[in-house]
Image (cartoon, rainbow, N blue to C red):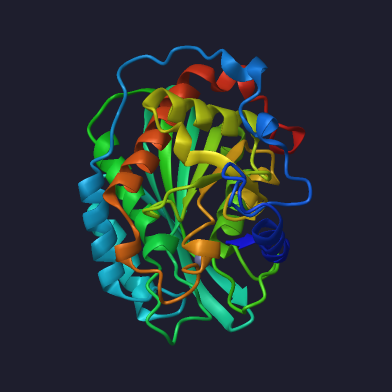
Amino acid sequence: MFNRMSQLFLLFLVFFILGCSGAKNTPAAAPSPTRQPDAQTAPSPQAAHYEEPAGSALHVDAGRAMQYTREIVAIGPRWDGGTGQQKVGAYLHSKLKNDQVEEDAFVADTPAGKIPMRNIVAKFPGTKDGIIVVGSHIDTNYPLRKTSFVGANDGACTSALLLAIADELRGKKLEGYSVWLAFFDGEESITKEWTDDDSLYGSRHLASRWQQDGTNRKIKGFLLADMIGDADLDILRDEHSTSWLEDLVYEAARRLGYQSYFFAGTGAMEDDHMPFKNLGVPVADLIDFTYGYNNVYHHTTEDTIDKLSTKSLKISGDVILETIRLLNANADKFGPMTKAAR
Ligand code: ZN
C-alpha cells in the first residue's frame, strides 16, 4: 500500500514539530495539502440518519484472530514467487475447508518476470440480492524478501481477521446481503517504486474479472482491511474512499463506542480498494498508516507481532461486522453506483 502524500507527511511533521507541538488534537496521520478541517472529516449531519439493522450485533473472537495471525506469521515471509506464498494459500484453504471457496489464479507480468498468483474468495450466502466484500492482502513486501520481514500488521493480521470473520459467519443464516471475503495476492509492488502497473496485481485482476462477469454491479460495499492490528490503533479517513461508506464505518464505530480510534487524521491511500473504486464500486479502506512513530515499522523488519494487540483486532473486526449490518439496512439508501459499474 502506498500513500502519495508520504513525502508531504515528512514536511508536515517538521512543520508540526517546529510550529505546533502543543496542538494535541492535530491529526498525526498522513495529511495532504487538501486535508479537510476536523469538522468536515466527521460524518456529515445529513448522513446521520440510519435505518436500524435487524438482528443482534456480531463479534469476532479476537483471541482466535491473534492466534491465526501468529500462525500466518510463523509461515515466514510470503512474497510472491516464494514458498511462503504457496504455504499461506494452503493455510487459508485449510481454515476455509468447509466453506464455499473460489480461486482466481493468474500469472502476473511483473518487473521480476511472470509470477503465478491467486486470489482466494470465501463466499457466505445471504438472503438479499447483493454482495458485501471484505478484503485483505496475503502477500508480504517483495523488495524485503531477503530479510526476516513477516508483515505481522501488513498482511498477516488482517487476513487472520477475515478468517475470524469467517468463523462468525459460518453456519449462520445471513439475513442480509451475501458476504464475500477476498484474500488478495500481489498487493505489494515488486520494485521499490510503487506504480500503477507495479502494485495491486491481485485486486486489479479480480476487479476486472468481476467487472466482466457482472459481480461489481452487485457489490453494495467493499471494505478493505490493512494494517489495523496495530496496538496503537489510529484508523485514518481515506480520501480515495467513498464518503458515505466511510460515514457508515464511523457510525458503526460510534455505535460500539470505538469512534476515538477512527478518522482523527486523513490520508489518500493507494491500496486494494482502488481497482474497485475505479469501476464505480463503493469502497472504504480501513487502514492505520501511523504504525509506530512516523510510521517507522511500516515495511521494515520491525513489523512483528509484538506491535499488535488483541484489542485492536477486536475493534477492527467488530466495526467491520457492524458496518456489514448497517450496510444491510442502509446500502440502498446511500449506495447508487456510478455509471462505470452499471
Ligand atoms: Zn505493505
Image-quadrant location for residue 315: top left
Residue shown at 32%/24% (left/top)? 57
- Number of marks in picture: 0
The percent coordinates of residue 3 (x first, y second) are 65, 60
Q: Position of residue 214 (x, y in %)?
A: 60, 38
Residue lying furthest front: 22
Quadrant placement of the C terminus: top right
Residue closer to the observer: 316 or 210 = 316
Looking at the image, is 261 positioned above or below residue 104?
above
Residue in the foreground of this view, choosing between 149 and 54: 149
Q: Is residue 122 above or below residue 184?
A: above
User: Relative to residue 14, is residue 250 drawn left or right?
Assistant: left
**Residue drawn 45% across the image and 26% down it:** 254
Q: Residue at x 45, y 79 (%)?
A: 81
Q: Position of residue 250 (x, y in %)?
A: 52, 30
Given residues 48 and 322, the one toward you in this image is 48
Q: Quadrant of the N terminus?
A: bottom right
| Residue 98 in sight from this viewpoint | no
User: In the image, what residue occupies the spot 58% across and 46% down?
Assistant: 210
Q: Up-down: is 5 above or below 75?
A: above
Examine the image and state in which quarter residue 213 appears.
Answer: top right
Residue 92 visible, this angle: yes
47 vs 214, nearest the viewer: 47
> Residue furthest toward the bottom?
146
Q: Position of residue 319 (x, y in %)?
A: 41, 34
Looking at the image, the residue that sits furthest to the right is 33
Q: Is residue 168 left or right of residue 139?
A: left
